Image (cartoon, rainbow, N blue to C red):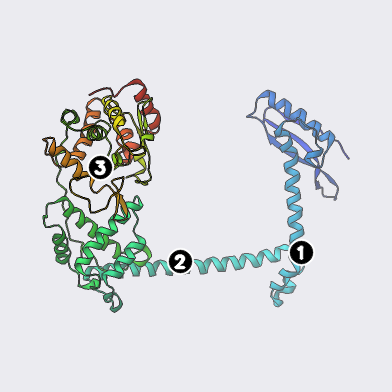
Amino acid sequence: MARYTVSFNLAQGKVQFRHPHVLVKDDRGRAYGKPLKFGVGKLTAKDQGQIVDDLNKLLQAAPLLRSEAPTGLHEKAYAFYFDPMAEQAERIRQQKRDEALRPELETLIPKQHAGEYRGRGNAAYLDIISGLTTQVTTLTARANEETKKREQAESELEGLTRAVGYQTEEQKKITLQQCLEQFTATVSCKSERARSDLIRKVTGVLEVLGLHTPHCRIRRVDIEAAVTKLVPDRKATEHIYKLRDMKRFFRAVSLDENNGGLGLPDPAYAIKPGTPRATARETLDPLLLLDLNLDDYWKAFVACLGLAGMRLSEAASLEWTMLDFDEKIIRLVESEQYPELKSANSVRDIPPFAQFWDHMEKHKQTATHSVLVFPKIVQRRPSKHGDKDHWFVMRKDKPSAVDLPGAFYAALKVAGVTVNEPARRLRRFFQTEIQARGLGYLLDACAGNTQDVRRAHYLNRLRIVSEAARTGVVGKL
């Protein structure tokens, strides 16, 4: 076997050599090593020199397998040597496959052209394949054009149908119950809870309209009358949201079947729900309530709402294990009584205002429950939900502290304070006070808000909250 060496062209930045195992033939049929060139101009001078030396070692050894090659060489040298061998092996395998398929391909040659194709080898089969490919391409283009025309006609027909309110006999038989089933199967929301709430609200309005009423009989005035029957105040926020929900429902079932609808006209198209009025976000100062003649139980409860920004249900589900008295952090998580908080962001660590821990220490000294911070207490009027050690009952398929708002309102009334929605106003106070102190970056992390845009700015909530508790950045009120 002839021995070859590597030459390096500095001007062109290329290495050139003849491969001992990748062979070509000259005009006389004599085999010789195929000349190969590879660019190395972008490599450093050190790498270029090493590649030339390593390629010479490979050419001297002339291995057939990577396992037989000298070790410790430059990877580029291995690639320049073995890649051409792999390409040659693939070409040989392809030739063998062509030879094996030749008897089968010969059956595709028309008998009248057998003499024309005989002796031409693969060129005959390539001519056949080329002709068939052209034919298939032409037919496919025609089919695509016909499909485009059909879809355009269907779209125009659907638009005209909706414009004049025309319905087929089958569509006239579709009831609101069937529309609701289609809507339930296709509607999607940000969360499963939001989806179930939307379906529940839509179902309530449809029950007023009559679930067995045909869709074709529903008019805009019927929808508005049904919503007004449920919410008489037309300016109320709930009235506006119910109209929005019904517009969404009828718009969804008006879509074509390919988009999850039934292709029906939209009777709610012209409904204008309006814009909800901005409500005054009234707050309630927790320090005023903590000075009242309340027992330690309710003072600690006020501290959870006003000094830690917790929701009423979150405070009702609070357990002693969630209170880290050493680190001064509330580690709010799901509990047995409240297994699913309002949102994923509700699971959080809260550094409350400093006075929180004073009232919680006093309450802990007189607490009677080993697990719950706020077990259910005996009320003057017996609860219709029975006697339990916690406030939660199942309502609309989810746990809710039904009796707690009334009990809290009654406790404040006995102490001489009468105010609507005290729990909500106390939580608003916490949020407002955090912002007023220039700590808006803590608001989402501490209050468990569900605003995705704002939450996206604070990726490491645990670090923010832990640092706030360690440095006492929240401080006292």
- Amino acid residing under circle 3: Ile
Q: Which residue is mark 1?
A: 100
Depth check: give the residue in front, 389 or 171: 389
Asked whether the residues under the numbered discs 2 and 1 touch, taking CB atoms below 8 Å apart as contact, a structural biologist would say no
Q: Is residue 327 above or below residue 401?
A: above
- How many C-alpha atoms fall within 10 Å of the one at disc 3: few (<14), some, or many (≥20)? some
Where is residue 91? Give x, y as percent. 74, 52
For badge 2, the amino acid type reads Asn
For residue 417, side relative to residue 24 (left or right): left
The count of marks equals: 3
The residue at the point 73 percent across, 51 percent down is 90
Report crowding for label 1: few under 14, some 14 to 19, many 20 or more residues within 10 A (C-alpha).
Answer: few
Residue found at the far top of this picture: 471
Q: Quadrant of residue 442?
A: top left
As helix, strand or loop, the secondary structure at mark 1 comes to helix
Q: Where, quadrant-wise, is the C terminus in this rendering? A: top left
Q: Please tell me which residue lies in front, 413 or 74.
A: 413
Which numbered disc flags the more N-terminal residue, 2 or 3? 2
Q: Earlier in the sequence, mark 1 or mark 3?
A: 1
Q: Nearer the viewer, residue 300 or 72?
A: 300
Q: Which mark is residue 11?
A: none
Q: Earlier in the sequence, mark 2 or mark 1?
A: 1
Label 2 belongs to which residue?
144
Disc 1/disc 3 C-alpha distance (Å): 88 Å
Name the residue nearer the viewer: 233 or 50.
233
Q: Residue at x 74, y 43 (%)?
A: 84
Q: Amino acid at mark 1?
A: Ala
Secondary structure at numbered mark 3: loop
Viewport quadrant of the N terminus: top right
Image spot of residue 308 (x, y percent): 28, 32
